[in-house]
Every structure is written in structure tokens, then in C-alpha cells.
Image: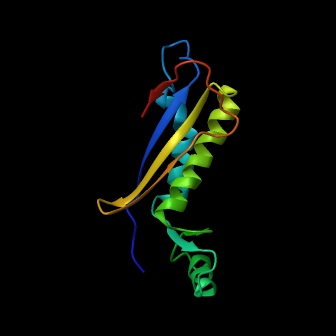
Amino acid sequence: MHGYSRSFTLWFAATELDDCGFVVDFSSLRPLDQQLREQFDHTFLVNADDPLMDEWQRLHALGAIDLRVMENVGMEATAALVWEWANVLLQERDGGRTCCWAVEARENSRNGGVVHRLPPWFELSGEPSISS
């Protein structure tokens, strides 16, 4: 068992800038920030198929750990999960004007994973505006 120190970098695109001239106003990402904190801040991550799952659930019930069960705790899978979360938020809020086109998830300087793709509902017409 070991702890993680996860960090994330997200890249965004927009079909047009918003009224303030932003691709994405980073202050509007507070719901995503909260979701990331709830999932990863001082929590115990475990794969859904972990052979010690019963023990982790017992320790969680005792309050010894704050358990989060994931399909895959690897960096690539984590980057994909955060990419999905970001795009759900952006599509609901901006109706397709913006998207997250890449997420880098890092555990440390030697271990990380990147997802790089446009969501199927995001359509560019002309030059996109991009930020990270």
C-alpha cells in the first residue's frame, strides 16, 4: 500500500470565446475541482477487482480509510475519468461551445498518463481557441 500525490493538467478548446474573452473561465470549474477533491484528496484508491476488497471495505466502515473504488487506479485510466468529468460539466454548462481535449494525470515526475481526444459532440468550424 502506498499513497498518491496526483496532479492534473487539462487543456480546453472553444468554438468561440465567451463574453469575457475566455475559452473557459477557470473560476467556473469549481464543480470539477470539488469532484477531484472528493475523489482524490486524502482518499484510499483501490481497483474494483482488488483481492483485499473486503478488508478495505471493513477498514472504511471503521473510519480508518476513506475508500474510493475505481475500475482502474492507473494514471491513464484516471486521466480518462477526469476527461469525462470535465466534458460532462462543459457540455451541460456551455452546450457544446467548449470541451476538454486533453488531460494529463501525474503521480510524480516519472509516472503519468495522458488522454488526448475531442468528445464526439464537439464540432469545430474554423480555428479553435485553445487554453490549458
Q: Is residue 60 above or below residue 93?
A: below
Residue 49 figure quarter: bottom right
From the top left corner, tell me how far across and down residue 92 is, in percent.
Answer: 70, 33
Taking the view exactly as shown, the residue that stands out farthest to the top is: 19
Residue 72 figure quarter: bottom right
Residue at 41 percent across and 58 percent down: it is 6
From the top left corner, tell me how far across and down residue 96 is, in percent.
Answer: 67, 28
How did the renderer colour the structure?
A: rainbow
Residue at 40 percent across and 66 percent down: it is 4
Residue at 65 percent across and 32 percent down: it is 122
Q: Is residue 74 above or below residue 105?
A: below
Tally the numbered discs.
0
Q: Viewed as shown, does residue 58 lie left or right of 103?
A: right
Residue nearest the viewer, comparing 41 with 12: 12
Quarter of the figure with the N terminus: bottom left
Residue at 59 percent across and 39 percent down: it is 118
Taking the view exactly as shown, the residue that stands out farthest to the front is: 126
Quarter of the figure with the C terminus: top left
Q: Is residue 49 above or below residue 39?
A: below
From the top left corner, tell me how far across and down residue 60 is, in percent.
Answer: 58, 76
From the top left corner, tell me how far across and down residue 55 is, in percent.
Answer: 58, 87
Q: Is residue 5 above or below residue 69?
A: above
